[in-house]
Image: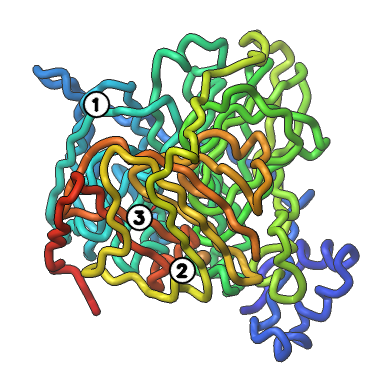
Amino acid sequence: MPLRRPRAVLATLAVFGVTALATTGLLSGCTGLFGAPVISTVGEVEFGAPLAIPPLAVSTVDADGTRVFDLTADEGGTEFLPGQATPTAGYNGSYLGPTLRASRGEQVEVRFTNRLDETTTLHWHGMHLPAAIDGGPHQPVAPGASWTPRWRIDQPAATLWYHPHPHGETADQVREGLAGMFILDDPAEAALPLPRDYGVDDIPVIVQDAAIRPDGSLGFTSDGFVGKLGDTLLVNGTVGPYLDVVTDVVRLRLLNASSARIYRFAFSDEREFAQIASDGGLLSAPVPVRGVQLSPGERAEVLVRMAPGEHVVLRSELPDLGGVVGFGGAADGASDRFDVLELRAAGVLASTGSVPAALVPVERIDPGEASEVRDFVLDGTQINQQKMDMNRIDAVVTVDTTELWRVRNNMSFPHNFHVHDVQFQVVSIDGAPPPPELAGWKDTVYLPPDRTYELVMRFADYADAEHPYMYHCHLLRHEDLGMMGQFVVVEPGQDVKIEESSHDHH
Ligand code: C2O
Ligand code: CU
Ligand code: CU
């Protein structure tokens, strides 16, 4: 691929001498990775556009109290760069989708219509709901067809998201813009003095990378082991965004909705900020941090304290991939840095109160209660030396039990691991306790090379011997290549009756 941002690349060469060789292609023969460019947009972004805030989805409440949303997936065009229409797709709009919002205990229904010219699915990432409406590869929605899942919200307040999950096509559909946020509320979160005025002091920050070709079409700047990477960040679909901050503390709901890129979010002045939530909800207490790393699919909520009149830039600094280094690392984004979003504080800031000392109790799941221990080894683009087969069940879980999953990345390249149905807890990393930011509820975790993550999870309910849930690497290329397995949750002693899928390609 030609380099489209010579200015940004040149700025980086001084820092990373070795990558000068990579960008000239001299090393491409050694790496087999086509001389991945090293990208830095730090100091290069003009922040000329106000951050787009996805609208809150309109909902109606039925006679029986069900909150009903309408979502339609359709193709469209989006002007990421002025005067250039990029072919995109979105829900109820041309790119991304509205933010759905519901409270714990509420019954929700989503009336989904597929107006794309290809089959899609609609998956509720992080949501605890029956497998039959999980929206994975077994619930295809054909062009023109509709699908209306209905469930009760039964989990803590959290920042979740939704996206397509068709077998083998997820990366392309997400990259085109099919993704949105799903915020859950509950009384425990509502009782805390946290910013929660959506779009004002409680801000969705959906981060994706893209490469926008001169004709407006979406391309990529490198194509490494992790998948396609781009040199332009889209934040809620905005290129070069700024946010006018009007309160002394602002809450950012960070979502990595990229297909391959791993970000380490930090501020231009290296200020400390507080991580208050991970994928599945609030942590027990705010964790003071100077950086938050998110691999594809992961979320974090953070509180940032602002002084009147100041400007500070949210960046993505070099990610800590845990041993993914060298020439291969450049193609996997290990050497890239970005300006993400400029926060511009008003001269006078309203007070939202202090950062609370404690958040919510996070009940620890006792790994000693696990009735089953399973091992998952990620190697190549397979899990336990097998590719996804929609007609094979890889694990049968008994409902109302706890399991310990030992997950290991056997390679020197990045992977991560996502489990549907449940939020898990990281028990240990190579035997050591997890850092505090990984000690809360998670549904997706980055897997550095050669380390074993022990995850404990409880399969409380929703036994269904006919419909599987998925676990997989959330680097979307890997997922599409079949780095995924299926589990069913059954009543004790129940036989698995997996239906022959009409959507199977094997
Ligand atoms: Cu974000 Cu299996 O999904
Ligand atoms: Cu998921
Ligand atoms: Cu992977």
Q: CA–CA distance between discs 3 and 2?
A: 22 Å
Of tags 3 and 1, which is closer to the observer?
1
| Viewer-closest of 432 and 98 | 432
**Mark 2: secondary structure:** helix
| Mark 1 burial class by Cα count in 10 Å: few <14, some 14-19, many 20+ | some
Q: Is residue 378 above or below residue 99?
A: below
Among the two numbered marks 3 and 2 on one chain, the one whose residue lies closer to the N terminus: 3
Q: Residue furthest bottom?
A: 29
Q: Quadrant of the C terminus?
A: bottom left
> Hey, what amino acid is under mark 3?
Ala
> Hey, what amino acid is under mark 1?
Ser
In the visual, does 157 lie left or right of 116?
right
The residue that appears at 66% across and 14% down in the rendered structure is 357
- Mark 2 CB in 8 Å range of ligand 3? yes
> Hey, what amino acid is under mark 2?
His
**Mark 1: secondary structure:** strand
The label number, if any, that marks residue 478 in the structure image: 2
The residue that appears at 39% across and 56% down in the rendered structure is 471
